[in-house]
Amino acid sequence: MTAYDGVFVEQSATPVVRKVALAHLSVELGHLYMEDFAAGQQRLRAQFEAVRPWVAAARRACADELGQRPPRVSTCFLIDDYFTRFSTPRAVIADLVAAADEAGLEIDYVARESGCAVADGIDVATLVRQHLVAEPPEGANGSRPPTAVSGWLSNGERGGEGPASAMAAPRAWRPPRQSAVQNHSIFVDIELWNGPADNPHWSCPFLAAVWQLQRLGLIRHLGEPVGEPQRMDPADAPEEWERMPAIVQLNPHAAAFRAYRTFSALGARYLPIELAVRTILGQIAVDATVAEQVVERAGAEGITLPGELVDRIRYAFL
């Protein structure tokens, strides 16, 4: 007998955790919203022109860390079809590929943001939510609902007056306090979803956290990876978003989509979102077997991975 997800089952019934192919580095070339696409091809070209030197720098850094071995590096691009549906996958992908090509870049994989919510019929976002370990701050008295109920996650204790006992004088205001504080607090309170918990509308930071976990190869459902990239020629992309796989592989010769580390070149407007992403990932308990697999495979290649997920993620904000 063995324990799996809190339930004791026969050893033979325990799902085998399947490994996924891993590159050394996953480079995100951008994140497209409707307003970016509506701004036209010039806006897309400007994005890739701005990203190009950072992509080259990320590749050099990866090569330097590996020494004599050639680095396995893949590129990806995320399209927001969750909050706003616009144009068609065929038109968007064609424009992205053309703009990247003009800037001397190649997009290996294109992903749908909706695929961070549901992929292959699996509720990926809820799967990740179930691995949240939101610790109550010191001195919590139960007045704030737990994350699973409220949909809010923080990195510490909220400020305020606090509850007072009956007939007692109001308590003095206290400032918010970060849990892992260094000299001064940077308190963050993040909305993970709104609406009912059984039918949530996920927030951008939470879906972006799922996106990072996917790129790091750390998501499984009953031992199986979710959202495996599907090979597709850009000309064969569908006209409807619902028919497009969660992750599409455009370059048949690309290194693996998932990687030991990720690098994202994003506009400065994404800074607050990525702060929220890092806060969320700091409170995710990744399946121990999956985490050990990745660390062991990296070790077999002579790579020492940081224990903290956020330390495997790097950025350039443009």
Image (cartoon, rainbow, N blue to C red):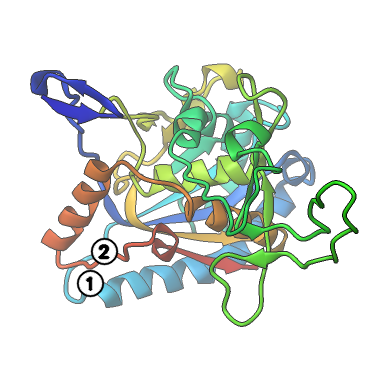
Between 313 and 156, which is closer to the camera in this rendering? 156
Note whether residue 239 is visible: no
Q: Residue at x 56, y 45 (%)?
A: 208
Amino acid type for the residue under numbered disc 2: Pro
Note whether residue 47 is visible: yes
Extreme bottom residue here? 183
Label 1 vs label 2, nearer the camera: 1
> The N terminus is located in which quarter?
top left
Residue 232 locus on image (x, y percent):
41, 28
Q: Residues within 10 Å of mark 1 (few under 14, many from 20)?
A: some
Whole-number angstrom distance, CA of label 1 to CA of label 2: 7 Å
Residue 316 locus on image (x, y percent):
56, 68
Which corner quadrant of the image does residue 170 belong to?
bottom right
Q: Which residue is mark 2?
A: 71
Residue 303, placed above or below residue 239: below
Residue 149 locus on image (x, y percent):
63, 31
Answer yes or no: do the residues labelled 1 and 2 have beta carbons within 8 Å?
Answer: yes
Q: Which residue is mark 1?
A: 66
